[in-house]
Amino acid sequence: MKLGIIGLGNMATAMLTGIIKAGIIAPADIKGSDPGIAERERAQNDLGINVTEDNKEAVKGSDYVILAVKPQVYETVLAEIKKAINKDQVLISIAPGKTTSYLEERLVSDVKAVRLMPNTPALVGEGCTGACRNKNVSDEEFEFVMKLLSGFGKAYKVKEEQMDAVVAVSGSSPAYVFMLIDAMADGAVAAGLDRNTAIQMAAQAVLGSAKMVLETGKHPGQLKDMVCSPAGTTIDAVEVLEQTGFRGSVMGAMSACVEKSRKI
């Protein structure tokens, strides 16, 4: 199986690192393109893949092609590779707001298109990716895409109309969590803990809490109640969060993210 990838930035590097480490595709069978010399050299030296400055070369001979460029250059890149893409190749897009219909309109109507929304924890092998496809992608081809995604975290099949929600709950959400960890650390520093220990403990608390949700199968509200002892410290903290609109702020942030994704 041959993989082409256009764009060799941080997200592309994270995805390729996981795919190669998992043994899904060998470096020799991957060709990446990027206009930046530094990006090409890094990919070649660190990952051992073939690199080129020509996007059409990355497409040529590849069974699957990942489009890992910024949304603002999609028009230019798609116009460039339009004649290089053939009906047997699967094009994988990771840009928010760029639907499979958008890809069909700018390439050909029978293009095989898969749309992804990964997130930055892919950099540490803990990514969370939503994926959908158009009608031209076979079950077998989509399953292989899901296998690729498993190399750098968890992947979930979703409907195209759900992708804006995926942007909010997965693609953008690490920023919310980083803000939570930062705020928790600030609070611990204010109470007398040193900064490094505060950050480490806050991050571990988030990691452990997330693992409990995933591994116990219990509703987050139920797990929250398990921590809140009668007349204890936690319920007082929860009361302050409720009074200051913690839930509403998070849900409002998610809504703003969804709306922006729809307009991109």
Image (cartoon, rainbow, N blue to C red):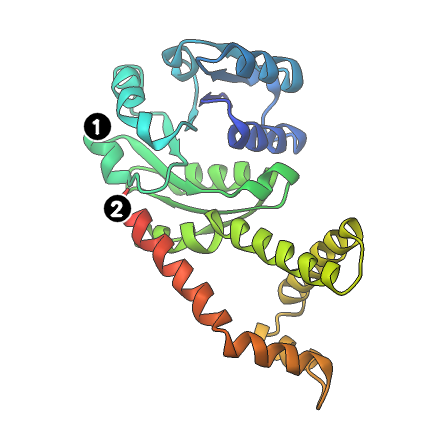
Q: Which one is in front, 233 or 163?
A: 233
Q: Which one is in front, 235 or 71?
A: 235
Give the residue at mark 2: 263
Q: Which amino acid type is shown beneath numbered disc 1?
A: Arg
**Residue 61 horizontal side relative to residue 10, left or right:** left
Residue 7 sits above or below residue 162 on the image: above
Q: Position of residue 153 (x, y in %)?
A: 59, 44
Q: Which amino acid type is shown beneath numbered disc 2?
A: Lys
Q: Residues within 10 Å of mark 2 (few under 14, many from 20)?
A: few
The quarter of the rendered structure image containing the C terminus is top left
Q: Which one is in front, 208 or 101?
A: 208
- Circle nearer the N terminus (1, 2): 1
- Asked if one can make out residue 73 in the rendered structure from this viewpoint, the answer is yes
Residue 106: mark: 1
In the image, what residue occupies the spot 30% across and 54% down? 259
Residue 250 sits above or below residue 120 on the image: below
- Asked if one can make out residue 109 in the rendered structure from this viewpoint, the answer is no
